[in-house]
Image: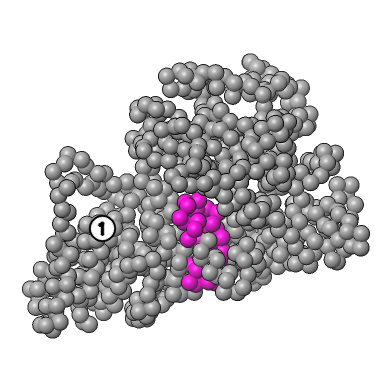
Amino acid sequence: MPQAWPDPRVYFVATVDRYKKDAGRFTPEHSDVLGQIQKQWRAESGDIGKRANKLGELIGSADAPPPLPAFRNGEVFASQVLDDLEAMDAPQRNAWSFLVSHAAICSGSKPSKAWENQARERIAKVGEAEFIERLRAWLPLIDQPCTTEREQRYEGSNYVYRFHPLQICDPHLDLLKGLVWMAGLIDNDDLTRTVGAVGISAYKKLPGIGPRATRVGNACVGALGNIASSSALTQLAVMKVRVKFGSAQQAIGKALGTLASAIGVSTEELEEMSVPAYGLTDVGRLEEPMGEFTAVLEVIDGKAELQFRKPDGKLQKAAPASVKEAFAEDLKELKSAAKDLEKMLIAQKERLDGLFLLRKSWPLEQWRERYLDHPVVGILARKLIWRFTGGADGRTMDAIWFDGALRDFDRQAIAPADDSTVTLWHPIDSDTAEIVRWRNWLFEHLIRQPFKQAHREIYLLTDAERATATYSNRFASHVLKQHQFNSLCAVRGWKNRLRLMVDDSYPPATRLLPEWGLRAEYWIEGMGNDYNDEYVTESGAFRYLVTDQVRFYPIDAGQATAHAGGGGYGPGWRETLGDPLPLDTIPPLVLSEVLRDVDLFVGVTSAGNDPNWSDGGPQGRHADYWQEYSFGDLGESAELRKQLLGSLLPRLKIASQCRLDGRFLVVEGKLRAYKI
């Protein structure tokens, strides 16, 4: 095999460095030529593109800044940076040029102390207020698509790579990364919000490419962790919900873990204790005098609505002119808080939904402080059912907040003992009669819970599963759309690898349950053995998966893998597999929640949902599956929907025109009947 020689240009920077040390400086001609070389190198990716930063550092001097690490290639962010610098006077442009050039020299996963010290000096030269203003204007521009088409041709090949309009070139990625690192040195709520938004944007996936700017997203997470303010914690919490990219979740978890360790608590407790109030003076409500008017911010159905009470007590939505003029800054902060509040409610809703598998419990007073009476979390917590266990007899009571008190499903106020322990109620811990009464109570009082709790699907162990003992076939033999399944796994906290038709082996989709010492597995394999468009995408990924068993193992047990070419699951080379656990030893709540996830995977991603599969899918081989999935027995989720419809239909004006017929809702219209 011929030897791969290194690019000789890698030695050029060292040569230039030695020359400068010997000569003391460059002549104007030298600087001009080196600047042209650096500009060419910046357009390249990989190692040469990074060495351009070092070359630029050598060209610069105390008086003359190095060439700018940005160029006009149609990327709106870079064009705006260059436009703004060109419009500055000479001293200001000089200071900003040094700052921007330093930002682009940002190798590694986190900034060094020396880099940070120099960054602080550069920020001081341009002024912190101006730095914040510029970054708040520049950074969001990465969301705008490139204004020109970009392509890269490879010498000796006819292949042409065309860039996605939202792709960012390597030199500009480095510049963005460095600017975000600099933002992490300043505790300013507006700038912190901008960094959080950029992080979410950077992790967004582009078709066929993946996350558009992972290094920028990671820089945002690091910057927020460095700021460590309540606003930064809010942004990290929002990112944890919005971003499901695997390594991004690890970075966010690491940042939260570092902050948690610093104050001696767990990550979960940090997320719980650090939810900001956003100035709310009551649960879901804020009133702030603004001259003769009073601003009223209230959360209604998850939306933060801002209105203004006039002196006569009437409300208006538009901000009065006098408020805009005299309280412009206060109004701006209030509107920003409203936006952040809505994002935080989404994050908290997901966090609360995940409490079932975290085995969380709280002393009564702590629960009141962090949940029931918290200005933000209380918005959600007061619509949920909680279980209280305490008192001399260890009595258990279930209640929800309604009409100013904790009440049971008979609307009787309850007073938990002071030593009570509080947990989030799960329907699997109650009998059928109690579950039905809670469901009816919520229905009668028109309370919409933030997530399914009383109406949550329950999956109990079946006789078939007792017979198979160590695995469940309840969701076997389904055909799933792989990419959709992979995305949903990330949303629900499962780990899964996208399967390619290559010589490789893959573990099953897994859910780690550290609080229970368990690992749940859903065995899946790629469908098809023909490398054609019906089974495989251009990138070589299987389009469809075939499902098999659900199993449980001790969390640290050896894991089976399956070859992409088929053949079933088995041990890897020189690996010892753990034994699967009997299903009747799995706590009912864990079994139910895991099977609920798997039911969701099947219900959302099954090819049976696709009407184009009515002809049997690839080569017509799966007609029986589509027919059975579309017209067979209802699953747990569908049965629950049917029950809800049965309760709801009699209350509708068109009740006489509707009826449930097996797995269908039939609506008799004036022209025709509809079978849904």
**Picture mark count:** 1
Residue 157 relative to residue 78: left or right: left
The vertical placement of 458 against 37, above or below, is above
Residue 417 position (above or below residue 73): below
Q: Which residue is mark 1?
A: 46
Position of 638 compared to 1: left or right?
right
Can you see residue 596?
Answer: no
Residue occupying the point 48% across, 72% down: 226
At a point 76% along the width and 56% down the height, the residue shown is 423
Q: Position of residue 13 (x, y in %)?
A: 17, 70
Taking the image as shown, residue 621 lies to the left or right of residue 657, namely left
Category of crowding for the residue at label 1, using alpha-carbon neighbours closer than 10 angstroms: few (below 14), some (14–19), many (at least 20): few
Q: Residue at x 60, y 38 (%)?
A: 550
Residue beneath the point at 76% across and 29% down: 646
Question: Viewer-proximal residue, 668 or 187?
Answer: 187
Q: Which residues are magenta?
A: 224-252
Q: Amino acid at mark 1?
A: Gly
Question: Taking the image as drawn, is residue 224 in sight?
Answer: yes
